[in-house]
Image (cartoon, helix red, strand yellow):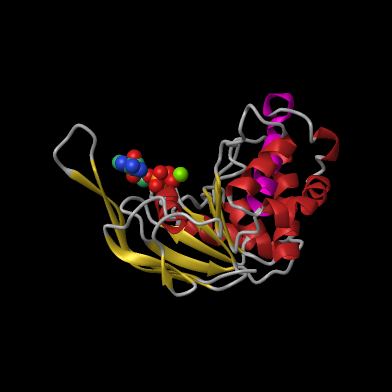
């Protein structure tokens, strides 16, 4: 199951803590994300990516404008919109299996879906670790557990807020493949926040580049390549250069440059 997410003229202003003035974080952001699409929000730290994702999750109320889920205005959270954070948020006092069970119970899907738990554990390579507590897992395993816990309730939209940000680059690359596999198998809509250009190109069909604060969508880049993608391919690196240039991080090496 998947769903359409629309954002229309979204503006978010925060009150600054301990001050009288306010801060414009998102300025008139609009986007239309089709059912089953994989979109990344790419931008520097502080540009409002998490705020935008939290509005879609229903955790923040827009100052102006609205977000819609299959045509319905979003107000409050819903198990149809799952959220995974950068730091895993597993319950420390529950095992991996216990974490999934708890989430299914909390969303009243336990009876219907308890038979799927073993499948999820196996899909994430965690069958042998189902009885482990979070502190008994590696960082990558914890993040995998958080991912399947979010997917187990079968959200139509999965919102990923830099879910791989805290991992070493090898674990990260493996988990990127896992995310693609899970997405292709489930077909849900994916909206992922990242500040990693390669991650955005490797995973998504469309990259929304956000400007520094106040955040707005400065450019949308389509990634035409099929999956799996090759990070070393010429069209991949060409796209990386294009994005770096747009974000003003690319520089020309002078002709007479020698070491
Ligand atoms: N609840 C809040 N109250 C006040 N300011 C906030 C709140 N949430 C985020 N901000 C501010 O909004 C800006 C954007 O934050 P965020 O959306 O987390 O950016 P990003 O995820 O792109 O790093 C930051 O300057 C942050 O301090
Ligand atoms: Mg953030």
Residue at 49% x, 62% y: name it: 208
* In the foreground, 21 or 185: 185
- Which stretch is magenta? 134-151
Q: Position of residue 204 (x, y in %)?
A: 62, 62
The image shows residue 247 at horizontal and vertical percentages of 45, 55
The single residue placed furthest to the top in the displayed view is 135
Quadrant assignment, res 145: top right
Can residue 140 be seen in this snapshot?
Answer: no
Relative placement, left or right, of 123 versus 72 is: right
Q: Is residue 246 above or below residue 226?
A: above
The x, y position of residue 254, in whole percent, is 51, 49
Q: Quadrant of residue 55?
A: bottom left
Q: Check residue 29 for magenta coloring.
A: no
Locate the C terminus and report the quarter of the image it occupies: top right
Looking at the image, how many numbered discs can be counted on the residues? 0
Q: Residue at x 70, y 36 (%)?
A: 98
Q: Residue at x 61, y 53 (%)?
A: 108
Ligand 1 sits in quadrant: top left
């Amino acid at each position: 199951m998947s769903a359409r997410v629309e954002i229309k003229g979204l503006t978010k202003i925060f009150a600054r803590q301990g001050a009288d003035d306010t801060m414009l974080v998102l300025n008139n952001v609009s986007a239309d994300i089709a059912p089953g699409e994989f979109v990344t929000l790419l931008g520097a730290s502080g540009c409002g990516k998490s705020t935008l994702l939290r509005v879609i999750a229903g955790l923040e109320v827009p100052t102006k404008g609205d977000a819609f889920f299959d045509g319905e205005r979003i107000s409050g959270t819903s198990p149809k919109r799952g959220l995974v954070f950068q730091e895993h948020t597993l319950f420390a006092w529950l095992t991996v299996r216990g974490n999934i069970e708890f989430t299914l119970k909390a969303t009243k899907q336990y009876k219907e879906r308890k038979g799927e738990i073993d499948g999820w554990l196996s899909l994430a390579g965690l069958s042998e670790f189902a009885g482990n507590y979070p502190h008994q897992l590696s960082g990558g395993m914890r993040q995998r557990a958080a991912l399947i816990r979010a997917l187990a309730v079968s959200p139509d939209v999965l919102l990923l807020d830099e879910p791989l940000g805290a991992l070493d680059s090898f674990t990260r690359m493996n988990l990127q493949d896992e995310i693609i596999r899970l997405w292709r198998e489930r077909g849900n809509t994916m909206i992922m926040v990242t500040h990693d250009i390669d991650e955005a190109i490797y995973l998504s069909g469309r990259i929304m580049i956000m400007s520094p604060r106040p955040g707005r969508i400065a450019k949308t880049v389509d990634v035409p390549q099929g999956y799996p993608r090759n990070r070393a391919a010429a069209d991949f690196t060409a796209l990386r250069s294009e994005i770096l240039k747009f974000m003003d991080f690319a520089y020309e090496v002078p002709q007479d440059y020698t070491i």
